[in-house]
Amino acid sequence: MNQNFTVPAFAEPITSLPDTPTCEAAELKRRFQAPADEVREAHNALAQAHEALDIKVEGIVTQAFVGAIHESMLDGDLTEKLNGKADQTALDAQIQALSTEESNRMKADNVLQTQIAAKCAIVTGTYTGTGLDKTQTISLGFRPKAVLVASARWSGNYYDPQMMNLAIDGMDADNICITSNGFEAKLYFNVNSAGNMDETIFRYIAFR
């Protein structure tokens, strides 16, 4: 009997994922690789079947016939197998199309990975100021692109209820300086400014 080596549909098509995937990176890579694995398995099975058929045909030529072999000399099952082999060109074209689709998926995967890496993550936290003319280092484990620091609200201050400082990588604020591992908080004035006022709780958002 003839075996069917076609791949009518992928078990886990990429199109079933949402436009913005939420799965882990390892699962996302596995999903992108799954269609290629299905194509590879079908191709390998087809190659093995062709190799077995070639061996059988060669044996028939050697043992039973001399000269050319005509289709009428073969039994029905072998005739069907040989006729199926004639469709190799069409099958090769299908495999090439699947290979092209796999290549396109890999390119899309690379673009997606680049876009994911480009997305900006944030880290939030608090620290307590240590006082005038003192510098406090806040370690984040990475060099942030920007840091926004806000002091506690002033009770009764309606005009400027909360002091803030925004530092951008390459452009420090008065009281905030970005470092290779986080940022430094300073206090230059003896006021409750967003920096390092003694015993003042500061909140920050660091953009990775």
Image (spheres, grey):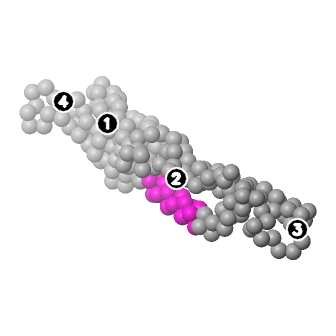
Q: Is residue 205 visible?
A: yes
**Of callouts 1 and 4, which one flags the residue occurring earlier in the amino acid sequence?**
4
Which numbered tag is attached to residue 65?
A: 3
For marks 3 and 1, the one nearer the N-term is 3
Bounds of the magenta segment = 93-113
Residue in the foreground of this view, choosing between 125 and 153: 125
Task: Report the residue that reaches farthest toward the bottom.
Answer: 67
Identified at 51% across, 41% down, the residue is 27
The residue beneath circle 4 is 153
Can residue 135 be seen in the rendering of this structure? no
Gap in angstroms between the C-alphas marked 4 and 2: 64 Å
Residue 78 horizontal/vertical position (percent): 74, 59
Location of mark 1 (residue): 204
Q: From mark 2 to mark 3, how far is it between C-alphas?
A: 39 Å
Q: Quick one: label 4 or label 3, which is nearer the N terminus?
A: 3
- Going by the numbered disc 1, the residue's amino acid type is Tyr
Callout 4 secondary element: loop
- Category of crowding for the residue at label 1, using alpha-carbon neighbours closer than 10 angstroms: few (below 14), some (14–19), many (at least 20): some
> For the residue labelled by badge 2, is the local secondary structure a helix, a strand or a loop?
loop
Report the residue that reaches farthest toward the front: 72
Q: Residue at x 54, y 45 (%)?
A: 30
Q: Secondary structure at mark 3?
A: loop
Residues 53 and 112: in front is 53
* Residue at the spot 78% in from the left edge and 56% down from the top edge: 52
